[in-house]
Amino acid sequence: MAGTVGAQAFESVEVGQSSRSANPANIDALLDQMTLDEKIGQLVQRMGGRSKALNSRLGPDELEKVRRGEVGSYLHVAGAEPLRELQRVAVEESRLGIPLLFSMDVVHGYRTIFPVPLAMAASWDPDTAVRHARIAATEASAAGLHWTFAPMVDIARDPRWGRIVEGAGEDAFLGSRMAVAQVRGFQGSDLAAADTIIAGAKHFGAYGAAEGGRDYAGAEVGKRTMQEVYLAPFRAAAEADTASYMTAFNAVDGVPTTGNAALLRTMLRDEWGWEGLLLSDWRAVEELMAHGVAGSRSDAARLALEASVDMDMVADVYAADLKAAIDADPALVPLLDQAVRRILETKRTLGLFDDPYKYHDAARESRVILSDDHRAAARTAAQRSIVLLKNEGDVLPLAKDAQHIALIGALADDALSQLGSWRARGMAEDVVTLRAALEAAHPNVTFAPGADSRSDDASGIPAAIAAAQSSDLIVLALGEDFDWSGEARSRSSLELPGRQRELFEALAATGKPLVVVLMGGRPLAIPEIAEKADAVLQTWLLGIEAGPAIVATLFGENNPGGKLPASFPRTTGQVPVNYDFLPSGRPADPDLTKDTARYMDQPITPLYAFGHGLSYTDFAYGEPMLDRSEIAADGGALTISVDVTNSGARGGDEVVQLYMRDPVANVSRPVKQLRGFRRVALAPGETKRVSFTLTADQFALWGPSGGWVIEPGEIELMIGSASDDIRGRTSFTITGRGAGRIAPAAIETRTLVMETGQ
Ligand code: NOJ
């Protein structure tokens, strides 16, 4: 690449050899030329702006830092042209001309905003997640970006934690599939292509297990749960070659992850063999002091470097204080070199040493961003993410004619909220709200806000009641606006915020048919709605095509096929209420006269279980069929198949779910664990055979002394429509003992769908 000093530095050592080739000698030669300050500079990620004011800090002082080689990467920057200029300064005006890495939180879309990740997980459709990530990468890369801080793969079993919205919910297997899908979508098959970006799976550790659901709080997680649940999606992302991870803010068992050498250097690097770029979260290196494990900034720098954290996000601890740590302990020098090498290797993988400007094509930027195709894909994703929680008396779908609809609820008219908490370059003006879409689709709609999710203002409720009374039917949008979920948005209560409950009760009392459209980024405790509403659609925060997707579902043009990726509790005090709990010596029993593992004042079940989701049609399941009754622990495999028939009158999608249980093992095992799923589309009367092929290592457990152990004995398999709607059971035997390689939940289950011709 003519005119780039970095590229010249490569060519001077390996004449005629492409700098993109995987020859570490090139990186080593560049390393040899670097001063200590230039090496440390590569480890520094600075903010080019704030998430809501991108590029705003890129003034003359900042450019001077780039010229001096003091920066390796920027976050919160965007735009093909401004970033070309910034890259030009790095490549043409710094001594070694090493290109910069540009990054941003592109979590569920860049400008074309898709449903929030929890919603996309509700599609139970990894292909939807691949498409979203591919489109997000296409747009982000056209805007000059190389790197996204996504997917967020933290397992969340406590919906009080506001960041549950950013991940795939409570289950490690579903979470792993969504993690892999997004890594593949962002990274594509060639990271050097101009339309792919590196994924940044986050937040490595057990961030989702924050105590009490309070963001940033420490986690107390047993070794087995850590390996089988919290780390599984990270392992799946490693198997999919995620090029980067971000460390979690919090501590596990008292050790802050950003300084946890046992977890990061020993396990992630040495045992998993992962060699990508490890980034700290925002100021997490500095926060090692607040955690109380570092007494000074140079201590914090040493701990993070020893843990193998390559890049320091915005804290400038590496920038200002790593040198002192190295002066005090020269043993850190090789660790520094490793970190620099990994960062340079990442830049090379992106092709930046060949052509540092390949991501700065303004014509492509204006062509691809928010294209019609992207918008159409966002609508499909939104439709596939909707979950029908209840449909008493088949009140849904609505007939297109005759009814006068009262559309109530401020959320129905709230464009900004549909963009969710990470909106990248998403704009409220791009959003089609439920109100706009319903008014466009139906001639008789009266809108009244009634109440919102934020204020204590109930003054709109009487007008909402009046609108309901003069209508045939109520569509009521309730839930949480975007700012109730996301980072630092934990809640102590999972009830409807504001005066919405009052609004709901008043409308339910009118006796009109009542359809609730639930919005928001977390499961809510809504027993009153479950009891009194005729129908409930969980619509999350669906992105720019939210309104059309919901309206198509209300009128039956879209038959909802989503399923819950996280259980809905009956009350806040019931959480965590995940489906894969341990049985206890006194398993929960509905009979209150028995002393069992339950609350006295609540049923033993969640309000809506993991995997729950209804349809406008019905599905009948045949008996599960196993191709064998025994497999060897050492390399055995088996296939379980089931025929699923659409027994109703409408086409629809069913998510066929496969669960396992190991009834007797060395350690107590969960009552159910998801091990396979497949979303299938079925025409009325149609039958398809769904087959899952499982290998022995998918039944392994984290053994009492560590390592993946496959034990001999019986395994039960269950197939059904939800974790609480099992339609068929069978079992088989594992013979002998074996060892697994990775977390079973991280292993993909091979799935096949066959037309049966009926
Ligand atoms: C802090 C968040 O925890 C993380 O998810 C995000 O990527 C960074 N800020 C950068 O915005």
Image (cartoon, grey):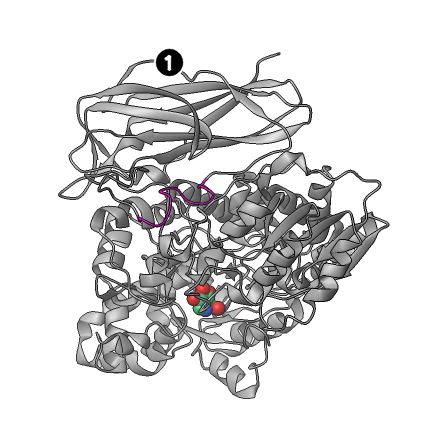
| Quarter residue 676 falls in | top left
Q: What percent of the width, then of the height, locates residue 452?
A: 63, 66
Q: Residues within 10 Å of mark 1 (few under 14, many from 20)?
A: few
The percent position of residue 660, horizontal first and vertical second, equals 34, 30
Residue at 60% x, 64% y: name it: 144
Work out whether residue 464 can be spotted: yes
Residue 455 sits above or below residue 200 on the image: below
> Which residue is identified by label 1?
627
Q: Magenta region, mostly helix, strand or loop? A: loop
Q: Quadrant of the N terminus?
A: bottom right
Residue most extreme to the left: 705
Where's ligand 1: which quadrant? Answer: bottom left
Residue 725 to residue 370: above or below: above
Q: Could one spot residue 430 in this view of the protein?
A: no
Residue 671 location (% of width, % of height): 30, 35
Find out whether residue 604 is within the magenta segment: yes
Q: Nearer the viewer, residue 525 or 307?
A: 525
The residue lying toward the viewer, choosing from 258 and 536, is 536
- Can you say whether 388 is above or below 487 in the image? above
Q: Is residue 555 magenta?
A: no
Identify the element where label 1 is drawn: loop
Label 1, ligand 1: CB separation under 8 Å: no
Quadrant containing the C terminus is: top right
- Which segment did they paint magenta? 599-610
Q: Can you name the residue that lies furthest to the right here?
A: 443
Left or right of 533? Residue 694 is left
User: Can you tell which quarter of the image residue 385 is in?
Assistant: top right
Count up the numbered dots. Answer: 1
Q: Amino acid at mark 1?
A: Asp
Residue 559 location (% of width, % of height)? 66, 36
> Which residue is found at the position 30% from the left and 82% from the top?
321
